[in-house]
Amino acid sequence: MNDLKRILAVTGFGILLASCGGSTPLISTPIENIDTTPLKVSELTKAEKENWGHLDLVTDTIPGMSVDKAYAEIIKGKKGKTVIVAVIDSGIDIDHEDLDDVLWTNKKEKPNNGIDDDKNGYVDDIHGWNFLGDGYDEQLEFVRLLASGNADDPRYAEAQKEYDTEHQKYMGYKTQYEQLKQQVKGADEKVSGHLKKADYTKEEVNAIATEDQGLQQSVAIIKYVYSLKFDSASDFVKELDDALEQIGDRLNYHLNKDFNGRKTGDDINNISETGYGNGNVKPVKKSESHGTHVAGIIAAERNNGKGANGVANNVQIMSIRAVPNGDEYDKDVALAIRYAVDNGAKVINGSFGKSYSPHSQWVRDAIKYASDNDVVFVHAAGNDSKDVDTEPNFPDDNVNYVEVSDSYIRVGSLTSKYGSDVVSGFSNYGNKNVDIFAPGSAVYSTTPENEYDSKGGTSMAAPGVAGIAALIRSQYPSLSAAQVKQAILESGLPLTTKVVVGGDANDVRPFSQLSTSGKIANAYNALIRASQLASNQ
């Protein structure tokens, strides 16, 4: 998993420390020149923040996927065929109020009898399978390489260099964040004491006039917190605590060469050894929220008066727990893909990735297996701000750009701001190896224990596209997986202008160069294009 960079970017610690339908036409991009388009300048409302990925670029000037428009004008209550979508991720809270009615259930298996009733090699796999067993924390893949001591590996020296850089960097982050937390807490206490209240407002802070230099500095710090779009110092400290927790995980587990989190007792280098793990697909703790969030983006029950709406309305979520707090194992991913295919999934979402993959061919073979069996595999592009055409990111579907699958879709991330900053600063990109972009920054969805939250990453962009794929497969079941991919890529909204890449204001490129399609995903258009393809069969 590679989502930590987003939290590190949000807080901006360096600044504070230093400065205190068949005949229906496809919709089009509003104006070709993004820089002269009338942009949405007001802040998103709460309702918009919680639904921006479903809004319409033309109507709302927000680069959503026109999901609400698709339901209002195309689907119009048509239920379609039920589609099984496999979510290969961390555990999913299958008891969540917004997910409990959209779960896949293996009707061939009798619950909790300790017998493999359907003879698929997995005992009591009622709602999916847990390839991690009781495991959760794990190393990164390049740290596993170093821990193996295999200096003959062609990437060993590269791994050692990366380890030295990463370890030093995160030790520095830990020190800086701890200092920053104390700064903000101290400033909050001083301002609270001056105003004689803990729940002061931005207006009250702005009104403070004092000759006390200490109080002036505290006011400046709190004003800076407000400038980062936090409502209070306590909200900012919570963000810091979240970041420190992830930094701790990075140092204690991900970069710890002496740590071994594997608990399943299998040989990770033996792909033929299967059946390990168990049928408990739930998270091991509340903070293991990634899979629940991804599942909600795809299929949270629509219009039930509860927290979020999924993209797809007639889906059964198959939960496959294979992504730990650290890098996933190639064996788990390869077997997870095959499990999904063999048990009826027609769409698979994979919101995970890494830069080292010792058994990449196992996963590539599984992706080909999915394609050969008419399954769409949607994969997150990754959150390293890098060009995956030149720097590896696994899994992938090609060797030297020769693709093994015609139904693999790799997805980059968008922000809610239509303009030159529309590409998420953390998002990977690639003219050959990323297919399309979709909403991924601050996406609102389900989290464990009947809660909801906004999270960002290409991990959130991929399930949006997986939801579109499920919609197409539901409404137009005659289309092949390859045609579903075709419909999504051909129908996206093209942006031919320049955007900031990798969050670097000095790196400005044409959006069309960042993916194979040069487009942003659009559910409304995709259903129209799917209808055209279906009518031509």
Image: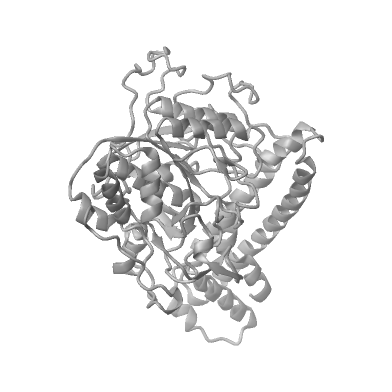
What residue is rendered at 56% in x and 53% in y?
383
The answer to whether residue 151 is left or right of residue 175 is: right
Q: From the viewer's side, name the closer residue of 326 and 332.
A: 332
Residue 253 in picture, x, y percent from top left: 66, 40
Answer above or below: position of 91 versus 522.
Answer: above
Q: In which quarter of the view is residue 187 placed?
A: bottom right
**Residue 267: horizontal and vertical position, in percent?**
64, 22
In the image, 433: left or right of 118? right
Which quadrant holds residue 86?
top left
Q: Residue at x 25, y 42 (%)?
A: 475
Residue 210 in view:
yes
- Where in the figure is residue 110, as x and y percent of width and height? 34, 16
Frontmost residue, 252 versus 414: 414
Farthest residue to the right: give it. 151
User: What number of labels is visible?
Assistant: 0
**Which image quarter holds the N terminus?**
top right
Query: Is residue 492 found left or right of 456 in the rendered image?
Result: left
Q: Can residue 297 be spotted in the picture? A: no
Q: Quadrant of residue 96?
A: top left
Point out the image quarter for the C terminus. Answer: top left
In the rendered view, does 61 fall on the left or right side of 323?
A: left
> From what the image shows, is residue 476 above or below residue 65?
above
Residue 502 location in percent, x, y?
58, 62
